[in-house]
Amino acid sequence: MKRLAILKRLAILAVAALLAGMPGLPASASQAGARERFLADLQQALGRSDGAWLAGHIDYPLTVRGRHKALIKSKYAFLTSSPGLLGPKLRADVMAQRPQDLFSNWQGMMIGSGDHNIWVHDTSPDPGRPDYRIFAINGAN
């Protein structure tokens, strides 16, 4: 009996591990629409260098990896460091992101490429009303 319980747990863990690594986890229509809206808003903010929009859509503390690793703890800290933070390669990769190619897993959604990307996750307690926030930036200056 104990062996059967262990096998069931292993099977559940194996399925969870497989789902976590799948690039396109299914999303409801409202989630897909919210993902596309967030991507479009993020690309517009990057296009006009709107640091205030970005600062308002971060789940602090923000982890930033680039030449150095940093932890940005507030809007003020982000706004004072953001002008040089988002380099041309990161911007280009985020601007080139197509909605149908967004990568998602259990951690959230990656916008950009493998080395230059922005990670976001849904911070809303209501699954029907996603509220995406940036929690990590990789490939920063």
Image (tube, rainbow, N blue to C red):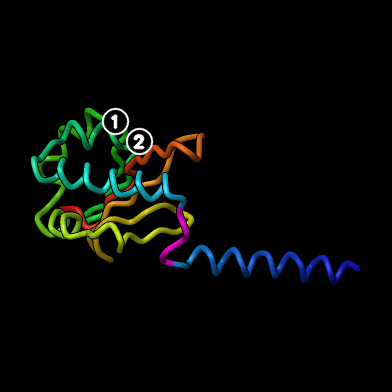
Q: Residue at x 65, y 65 (%)?
A: 13
What mark, if any, has residue 74 been given in the picture?
Answer: 1
- Judge the density around disc 2: few (<14), some (14-19), many (≥20) Cα neighbours within 10 Å: some
Q: Which quadrant holds the N terminus? A: bottom right
- Quarter location, residue 4: bottom right
Q: Residue at x 48, y 56 (%)?
A: 106
**114 or 73, which lies in front?**
114
Q: Residue at x 13, y 58 (%)?
A: 92
Amino acid carrying label 2: it is Tyr
**90 or 80, which lies in front?**
90
Q: State if disc 2 and disc 1 touch (CB < 8 Å).
A: yes
Write the start and end of the magenta stretch as one range. 23-27
Q: Position of residue 53 (x, y in %)?
A: 20, 33
Q: Position of residue 131 (x, y in %)?
A: 39, 37
- Judge the density around disc 1: few (<14), some (14-19), many (≥20) Cα neighbours within 10 Å: some
What mark, if any, has residue 10 been given in the picture?
Answer: none
- Quarter location, residue 139: bottom left
Q: Position of residue 94 (x, y in %)?
A: 20, 55
Q: Which residue is mark 2?
A: 60
Kindly give the residue lying farthest to the right in the view shown: 1
